[in-house]
Image (cartoon, rainbow, N blue to C red):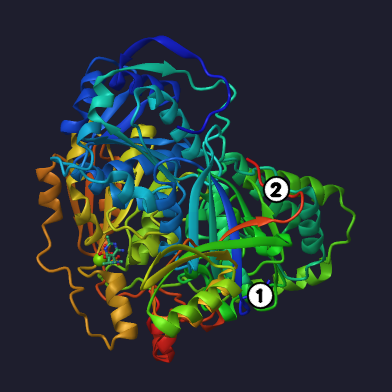
């Protein structure tokens, strides 16, 4: 085994491997794990039974265990921990692991494995877990020797949370869990890894270059992403300070929402495929772009050769492989977002380069004009509830409660409406599956958030199709009395699929109708939760009020317009300035090129 | 940095000598659609538990930068060195080449082998196995000449490479 070179204390007394595992978790500050038992991990479950330091949350499906750990991690900044059995337990977890990989969420997933002497024999519930999860994790380990056990777990936490965070799997053969193993303390000074040493401190020369470029810029923009959230709340505070200090317009990616307060007038809203008119035109027209902890994802850039054609690009990222991957940049800055922002603020204050004040004022005038388009306007009239209106009312009514509110979403139109209409003010309050786009993420994620924040208001804004993908977790809510609110925008369609079919496939709604839906009110009842339904606009507020007031878990089935589309939209393969603003312009979508058609 | 100009890069990677490392590297190339022209790996330091991988790949400058950054991101990777950019370096490959034939062809094969400094490491009355080391192009050229003379089988190691002079890689 590799990794630590620093001196570590090894205890002489040996305890069964399973106890060593729990002790290592405890030393890593773990107080809760999300898991599901099975033969290969029975020794760990036995050890769990005999202690009180670590709380185990029994989920109903291993995928949900990982999403719950993601929700826990994203809302606390701590590493989320998962425990599953070998074979099907591990394979069920894979979607969650890839989700965490794509969105850079720190998770340690312990998987059971058949005993070492049976590995490779197609033993009962054997799967090549390290093989299967190699491209699904930031790193993984198979523990083959008892003396490595504790050290591997400490390493796993270090790898999961440092640098660009991500999921780490530790595969634990059953004999290793039973045999006595020595304990190795986590090195007090932190793990010093032999080969893995992420760079967190930025190069001051690059900082200066970036600051000067921005000061001279006539049309600047700050485009920030999940990296700022991952860096910790201090980075979001620094981002806010920097944007206010420099008075630049700021837009967030889907993963970056909450890093900058949505209510600040410098906030342009989200950018990208369903971003605002003003955010996307600012990206298109800017002359200097500061990308802070985002990765020029294809949902953001649209057609690459038309992406922000006349700007100099500064890209700050902790992962060097994100730089120059999709978009060539002029000033790369490798480091932690918080440290970069702190350095930029200092440099901005001390550097004497004159600021292009007049030009920037004119830029703001232009932006205010774009804003008057009011691209998120909708008309709520008649009795049919508009989904946008439902989210807006949810936002307003939760604001009115003054409670600390955490939003998770599933995947689809409702997710985009949540991003557009539920203004997030603070970091770590917004959990969504951005990179992988995993339907079924929201309910278990909200569950993980609620475990970490028992008194907070946790709402999963869901679609009627997505929610069925992990609906079994209603059982977990009941067992632990977690008052998560599931707010379903029920349009009876896989709305996002239907929208693409309408725009790109001649309204042939192939298999996108949510046929034979359950009665969600009765379903809630069956899971010992409160079920509510709003069928008409005049019932909406009452249902939201009742949902917020109910002390336990709730499913609120909000019957919304079936054929509403999510706008603005940049059709795939189009550029930022080719956005469709609303139904009147839908015919423009016919202009989607063959190149665009192949894009997801 | 060009995103149109395609070049070949010879990249040396120093890694932890641990289970699964080769699968990580190969999986990275296949998963992200990068080319592998050749790849060699062997333990180079038993004490420090290090292996060295030499990978020859082609791509635009932007893709090759990506490949290096992605390799460097793997947890058990110590160091990535693009020898093609770092300066003068040596590239060597070993090949074993079997030629089967009689009479005139056999004589001609032996004569050419001599010219290419290929060694005969096995012979029967109807066959030779030649061993040669050198740059891949030299081996290509030799094999092309052997084809009409009864070339039966080729096996090649793929390139290994090292910088000239005092510059060296150490973990
Ligand atoms: C696991 C998974 N399968 C398929 C998809 C493709 N997909 C994206 S959105 C969507 C429809 C979601 O429907 P619903 O949950 O009702 O949300 P709506 O778009 O109607 O708001 C589908 C099938 C996905 N994102 N995830
Ligand atoms: Mg739907």
Q: Chain of mark 2?
A: B
User: Which is closer to the viewer, label 1 or label 2?
Assistant: 2
The quadrant where ligand 1 appears is bottom left
Number of other residues with Cα within 10 Å of mark 2, as a class: few under 14, some 14 to 19, many 20 or more: few
Looking at this rendering, what residue extends furthest in the top direction? Answer: A13
Number of other residues with Cα within 10 Å of mark 1, as a class: few under 14, some 14 to 19, many 20 or more: few
The yes-or-no answer for disc 1 within 8 Å of ligand 1 is no
Residue A454 appears at what percent x and percent y? 35, 32
On screen, residue A521 versus residue B10, left or right, reads left
Residue A385 appears at what percent x and percent y? 28, 67
- Residue that numbered label 1 is attached to: B2
What residue is at 46 percent from the left and 54 percent from the top? B25
Pointers 1 and 2 in contact (C-beta within 8 Å): no
What residue is at 32 percent from the left and 13 percent from the top? A15
- Residue that numbered label 2 is attached to: B168
Q: Which quadrant of the figure contains the C terminus of chain A?
A: bottom left
In this rendering, the answer to whether A597 lies above or below A521 is below
On screen, residue A486 versus residue B102, left or right, reads left
In this rendering, the answer to whether A403 lies above or below A564 is above
Can the viewer see residue A48?
Answer: yes
Mark 2 element type: loop
What residue is at 53 percent from the left and 67 percent from the top? A271
Residue A483 appears at what percent x and percent y? 27, 38
Relative depth, front residue between A517 and A501:
A501
Residue A544 appears at what percent x and percent y? 29, 51
Relative depth, front residue between A453 and A325:
A325
Of the numbered discs 1 and 2, the one sitting upstream in the chain is 1
The quadrant where residue A493 appears: bottom left
Q: Chain of mark 1?
A: B
Relative depth, front residue between A66 and A12:
A12
Q: CA distance from mark 1 to mark 2?
A: 28 Å
């Amino acid at each position: 085994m590799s990794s630590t070179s620093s001196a570590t204390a090894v205890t002489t007394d040996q305890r069964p491997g399973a106890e060593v595992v729990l002790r290592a978790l405890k030393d890593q500050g773990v107080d809760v794990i999300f898991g599901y038992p099975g033969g290969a991990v029975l020794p760990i479950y036995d050890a769990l039974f005999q202690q009180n330091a670590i709380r185990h949350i029994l989920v109903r499906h291993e995928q949900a265990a990982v999403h719950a750990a993601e929700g826990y991690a994203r809302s606390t900044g701590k590493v989320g921990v998962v425990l599953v059995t070998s074979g099907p337990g591990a394979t069920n977890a894979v979607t969650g692991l890839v989700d965490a990989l794509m969105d850079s969420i720190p998770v340690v997933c312990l998987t059971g494995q058949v005993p070492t002497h049976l590995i490779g024999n197609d033993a009962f519930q054997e799967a090549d877990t390290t093989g299967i999860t190699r491209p699904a994790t930031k790193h993984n380990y198979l523990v083959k020797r008892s003396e490595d056990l504790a050290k591997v777990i400490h390493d796993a936490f270090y790898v999961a949370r440092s640098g660009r965070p991500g999921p780490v799997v530790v595969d634990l053969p059953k004999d290793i869990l039973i045999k006595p193993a020595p304990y190795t303390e986590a090195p007090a000074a932190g793990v010093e890894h032999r080969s893995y040493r992420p760079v967190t401190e930025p190069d001051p020369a690059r900082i200066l270059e970036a600051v000067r470029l921005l000061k001279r810029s006539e049309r600047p923009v700050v485009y920030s992403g999940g990296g700022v959230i991952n860096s910790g709340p201090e980075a979001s505070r620094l981002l806010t300070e920097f944007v206010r200090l420099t008075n630049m317009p700021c837009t967030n990616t889907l993963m970056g929402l909450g890093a900058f307060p949505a209510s600040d007038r410098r906030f342009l809203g989200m950018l990208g495929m369903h971003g605002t008119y003003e955010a996307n035109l600012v990206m298109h027209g800017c002359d200097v772009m500061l990308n802070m902890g985002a990765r020029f994802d294809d949902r953001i850039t649209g057609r690459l050769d038309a992406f922000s054609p006349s700007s100099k690009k500064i890209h700050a990222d902790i992962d060097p492989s994100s730089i120059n991957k999709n978009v060539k940049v002029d000033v790369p800055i490798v480091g932690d977002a918080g440290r970069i922002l702190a350095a930029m603020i200092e440099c901005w204050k001390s550097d004497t380069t004159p600021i292009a004040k007049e030009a920037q004022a004119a830029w703001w005038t232009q932006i205010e004009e774009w804003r008057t388009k009011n691209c998120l306007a909708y008309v709520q009239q008649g009795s049919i509830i508009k989904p946008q209106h439902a989210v807006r009312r949810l936002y307003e009514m939760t604001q009115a409660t003054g409670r600390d509110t955490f939003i998770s979403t599933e995947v689809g139109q409702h997710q985009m409406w949540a991003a557009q209409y539920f203004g997030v003010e603070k970091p770590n309050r917004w959990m969504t599956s951005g990179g992988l786009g995993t339907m079924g993420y929201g309910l278990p994620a909200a569950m993980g958030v609620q475990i970490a924040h028992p008194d907070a208001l946790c709402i999963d804004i869901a679609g009627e199709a997505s929610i069925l993908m992990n609906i079994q977790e209603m059982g977990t809510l009941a067992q632990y009395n977690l008052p998560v609110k599931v707010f379903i925008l029920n349009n009876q369609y896989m709305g996002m699929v239907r929208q693409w079919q309408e725009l790109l496939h001649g309204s042939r709604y192939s298999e996108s109708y949510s046929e034979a839906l359950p009665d969600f009110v009765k379903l809630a009842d069956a899971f010992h939760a409160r079920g509510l339904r709003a069928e008409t606009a005049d019932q909406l507020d009452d249902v939201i009020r009742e949902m917020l007031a109910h002390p336990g878990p709730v499913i609120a089935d909000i019957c919304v317009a079936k054929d509403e589309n999510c706008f603005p939209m940049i059709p795939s393969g189009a550029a930022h300035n080719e956005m469709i603003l609303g139904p009147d312009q839908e015919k423009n979508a016919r202009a989607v090129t063959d190149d665009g058609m192949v894009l997801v | 940095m060009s995103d149109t100009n395609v070049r070949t890069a010879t990249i040396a990677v120093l890694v932890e000598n641990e289970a699964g490392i080769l699968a990580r590297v190969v999986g990275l190339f296949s998963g992200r659609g990068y080319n592998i022209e050749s790849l060699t790996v062997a333990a180079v330091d038993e004490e420090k538990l290090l292996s060295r991988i030499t990978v020859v790949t082609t791509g635009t400058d932007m893709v090759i930068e990506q490949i290096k950054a992605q390799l460097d991101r793997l947890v058990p990777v110590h160091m990535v060195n693009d020898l093609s950019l770092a300066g003068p370096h040596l590239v060597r490959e070993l090949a074993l080449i079997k030629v089967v034939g009689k009479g005139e062809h056999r004589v001609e094969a032996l004569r050419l082998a001599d010219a290419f400094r290929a060694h005969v490491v096995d012979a029967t009355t109807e066959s030779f196995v030649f061993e040669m080391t050198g740059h891949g192009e030299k081996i290509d050229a030799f094999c092309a000449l052997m084809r009409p003379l009864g070339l039966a089988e080729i096996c090649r190691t793929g390139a290994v490479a090292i910088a000239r002079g005092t510059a060296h890689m150490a973990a």
